[in-house]
Amino acid sequence: MYFTEEPEHIRQLRDVIRRFVAAEMPPELRRRLDREHRFPPELFRKLAALGVCGLTIDEAYGGQGRDLVAAVAVIEELCRGGAFLAGPFIHCAFYGGMNISENGSEEQKQALLPRLARGELLFAYGLSEPEVGGDLASVATTATRSPDGRTIRIDGFKRWCTGADWVDYIYCLVRSGPPEARYKNLSFVLIPPKTPGIRVHPIEHANLRYTLSSDVLFENVEVPASQIVGGEAGWNRGWRMLAGRALDVEKIEISAVTFGIAQAAVEEAWQYAQDRKQFGRPISGHQAIRHALAEARTKLEACRLMLYRAAWLAQTNQPCSVETSMAKLFIAETGVEIALACQRVLGAYGLAEGHDMERHVRDLLGMPIVGGSSNMQKNNIANRLGLAGEERA
Ligand SMILES: Cc1cc2nc3c(=O)[nH]c(=O)nc-3n(C[C@H](O)[C@H](O)[C@H](O)COP(=O)(O)OP(=O)(O)OC[C@H]3O[C@@H](n4cnc5c(N)ncnc54)[C@H](O)[C@@H]3O)c2cc1C
């Protein structure tokens, strides 16, 4: 379906989200939220009332039925108004709904999925650490079982944990077995950030300012063993969960965010070029500007095809590690090119307050790093396609 016409239900969904963004997210609000580094929870509740948070969750657990292509379209449309609602939507529908649907125990699915589908729970990703960026299998935050096995003690340090100050659970990757068993000693544990022993320190950053990302310190933090994602069967199976579907879908989410923001940048530059007059005519009449905008539109079209093909492969449960890496690599790098080209069309105003462009530029510049850097995508593509010389850790 990714190369034919979009299904009617997704077109209708886009329409609903477009109207929601136009009515609820005026440009002045977006600019203020960016300055304040926050999103409005009441607006997220309104969005959730549209039923979109259930798009990653089976009907049996209160969702709309898993439809990753539709969920990606929601991210894209929200991001045309900035990341302010796409961010919390991802924290709910993807970090929560998709991961628990894929990896949760039956007990966890029954307890969490209906609430996630209603938008009542939000998750953060606790993957990165001060010494761990792309090399996720090296996480040093430890999980130790009590002698009776009923509780787990968490000690360590997570970094860049976006939303740690407002989520219900950190979906936290921890080292749960002997260090020498590199990929067989990792687990995911659901940790409420208000648990005693946790300290959260926000980090100022220039991009994706719908919230703060934080350092999270764990000292003697105790949680029940029932919080192991997947229950007892999930202990030491964290790498399998991550490599199974989570990383592929994370690449698709970030690509969708990038694509939505890049479209907003092109739309702003397109309009500006027709409004701004220099040398007696709109600057859209100068060939250099026309070509820059025509190129940007062409790049967007290529991004759209790669994004929705990757989403369709994930939705239909086909192997898609290579395609999701190619989409993330291409869309993130192209997003930077689009940002810089569009910012130039606005001249000085492309970096000034009163326009959205400077925010688009800041957001897009970060995309080749967040959610797995461009180099990591290239490594994955070369390794998975069998190019000789793979570095093995
Ligand atoms: C705004 C923001 C929000 C974030 N939110 C979260 C979050 O919610 N949860 C979370 O867990 N993390 C989060 N992150 C962290 C993000 O996912 C990491 O920044 C990303 O994975 C890259 O890690 P790093 O920055 O430590 O770079 P590093 O891994 O240290 O890499 C630095 C540079 O070296 C290159 N490099 C590293 N290894 C190789 C190699 N083997 N081959 C070639 N090149 C290599 C990289 O490509 C990069 O250019 C967030 C980051 C930001 C900026």
Image (cartoon, rainbow, N blue to C red):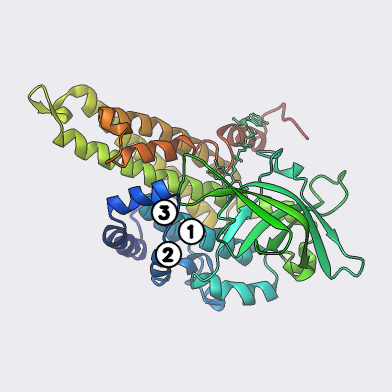
Q: Give the structural element (helix, strand or loop) at label 3.
A: loop
Identify the residue position indicated by label 3 in the image: 84
Quadrant of the rendering where the C terminus is positioned: top right
Q: Give the structural element (helix, strand or loop) at label 1.
A: helix
Q: For residue 13, what is the image quadrant?
A: bottom left
Q: For residue 391, what is the image quadrant?
A: top right
Looking at this view, is 377 or 49 the one in front? 49
Looking at this view, is 157 or 387 the one in front? 157
Calculate the distance from the C-alpha at mark 3 to the C-alpha at mark 1.
Answer: 7 Å
Identify the residue position indicated by label 1 in the image: 88
Local crowd at mark 2 within 10 Å, few (<14), some, or many (≥20)?
some
Q: Are marks 1 and 2 in contact (CB under 8 Å)?
A: yes
Q: Amino acid type of disc 1?
A: Pro
Ligand 1: give its quadrant: top right
Identify the residue position indicated by label 2 in the image: 44
Q: Give the structural element (helix, strand or loop) at label 2.
A: helix
Number of numbered tags placed on the structure image: 3
Q: Is residue 131 left or right of residue 142?
A: left
